[in-house]
Image (cartoon, rainbow, N blue to C red):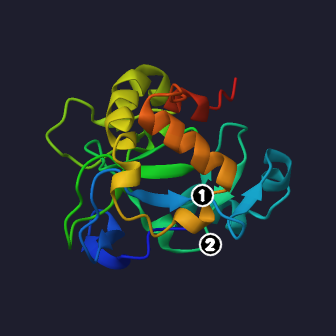
Amino acid sequence: MIHPDTEVKFISNEVGYGLVARKFIPMGTITWVLDKFDQTFSRTAFDSLEMTYKEILDTYAFRDHCGNYVLCWDNARYVNHSFKANCLSTAYDFELAIRDIHPGEELTDDYGYLNINEPFRGRNEGTKRKIVYPDDVVKYHKVWDRKLARAFKKVSKVDQPLRAIIPPAKWQEINQIEKGEKEMDSILKCYFNEG
């Protein structure tokens, strides 16, 4: 489930539509949570689909650490890639805002941790990275972990509209990480190695 203070808007001819903030979303806010309405397709289920459905999953789904295709039921599927992403996935089936996101600003992920099937060239954002590769999480997990660790420190200090979707045991673990009582699992746990 995507953060409720977002909406789909046309971004550009290059990327099409994206998801933007309707209100201020501070760093440490949970921006997306895997919920009971999201659909998960195993590789076997994916392979049994007609090409039309495979193309939809290739466009709108991400692959989890088991290689399953996860299709979000809501507007989360409109979150675009950015090499300067303001949201990052965690090893806990949710994403965090890793910096403040202002009204009208697009919410973005780095698709390098979403287990894409094929490399692709991202939009030019003036970064050294120009191409997203299926194994980028292996290369960049330490950088992303540092950003996530800073965001985790603010989780209980900001409003969390998606709090009710987080199971109690997971919420307790989040609080332990925030307080430094437990080490945060690396984003590397999201990696699925096709090989």
Near-viewer residue (125 or 24): 24
User: Left or right: 111 with respect to 193?
Assistant: left
The disc at residue 88 is none
Amino acid, disc 2 = Trp
Percent position of residue 87, x then y: 36, 50
Residue 137 visible in the shown view: yes
Residue drawn at (50%, 28%) of the image = 181
Dividing the image into 4 quarters, which one contains the C terminus? Answer: top right
Residue drawn at (27%, 36%) of the image = 130
Amino acid, disc 1 = Ala
Which residue is under mark 1? 61
The answer to whether 108 is drawn above or below residue 176 in the figure is below
Which residue is under mark 2? 73
Near-viewer residue (35 or 16): 35
Near-viewer residue (28 or 105): 28
Disc 2: CA contacts within 10 A as few (<14), some (14-19) or many (>=20): some
The CA span between labels 2 and 1 is: 10 Å
Percent position of residue 148, x then y: 38, 37
Near-viewer residue (81 or 12): 81
Residue drawn at (27%, 63%) of the image = 14
